[in-house]
Image (cartoon, rainbow, N blue to C red):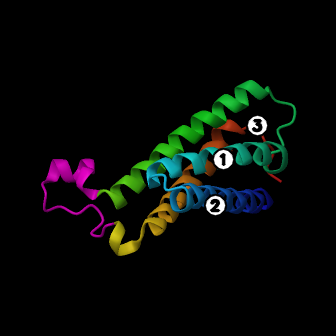
Amino acid sequence: MVQLIKYGIVGVSNSLITLAVIFVFNSLLNFSLLIADVLGYVAGVINSFIWNKQWVFKTHDTKLAKEMGLFVTGFLICFALQFITLLIITKPTIAIAEASLGSDFAVIGMDAKEIGEYAAVIIGMVVYTLSNYIFNRFVTFKKAKIV
């Protein structure tokens, strides 16, 4: 339970870093939301690896290269899930489900104008956070002791 709480604290800091980078690049520097999203998650994943390795899962005695490779693999898988979620919400016309079911099908029933782009980003963050915890707990840092 303590480990999950620590993961949550790291997750909040990652989310704040990710959101800040997305906001700066999208709103202040006029990058597209999708490019800003990628940049935000890269900043968050760097923070995440350091804190999860050292503080949450405490895997000091493992091979850094292997752990980093697994962490990046998990990040890419979970980021893809998040990015697909963001695309489905903000760009429903390009969603795979819509293409296969016809133009009258709405994947979620709303678009980015109805819920706002940043609400879509936050929904994607929930998808990312849950899938990333599961991956890191059972794959990347699987030898970590549960405190």
Q: Which mark is residue 43?
A: 1
Locate residue 50: give its quadrant: top right
- Which of the two labelled residues, at mark 3 and mark 1, occupies the earlier sequence position? 1
The residue carrying pointer 2 sits among few (fewer than 14), some (14 to 19) or many (20 or more) residues within 10 Å by Cα, namely: some
The residue that mark 2 highlights is 20
- Range drawn in magenta: 92-111
Residue 35, placed above or below residue 90? above
How far is the residue under mark 2 from the one under mark 3? 33 Å
Q: How far apart in space, not on screen, are marks 3 and 1 (Cα)?
A: 26 Å
Q: To which residue does mark 3 refer? A: 143
User: Is residue 48 part of the magenta span, yes or no?
Assistant: no
Residue 113 locus on image (x, y percent): 34, 71
Instruction: Tell me whether circle 2 and circle 3 mark residues in contact (CB < 8 Å).
Output: no
Q: Is residue 137 left or right of residue 36?
A: right
Q: 145 or 49, which is in the foreground?
A: 49
Residue 20 figure quarter: bottom right
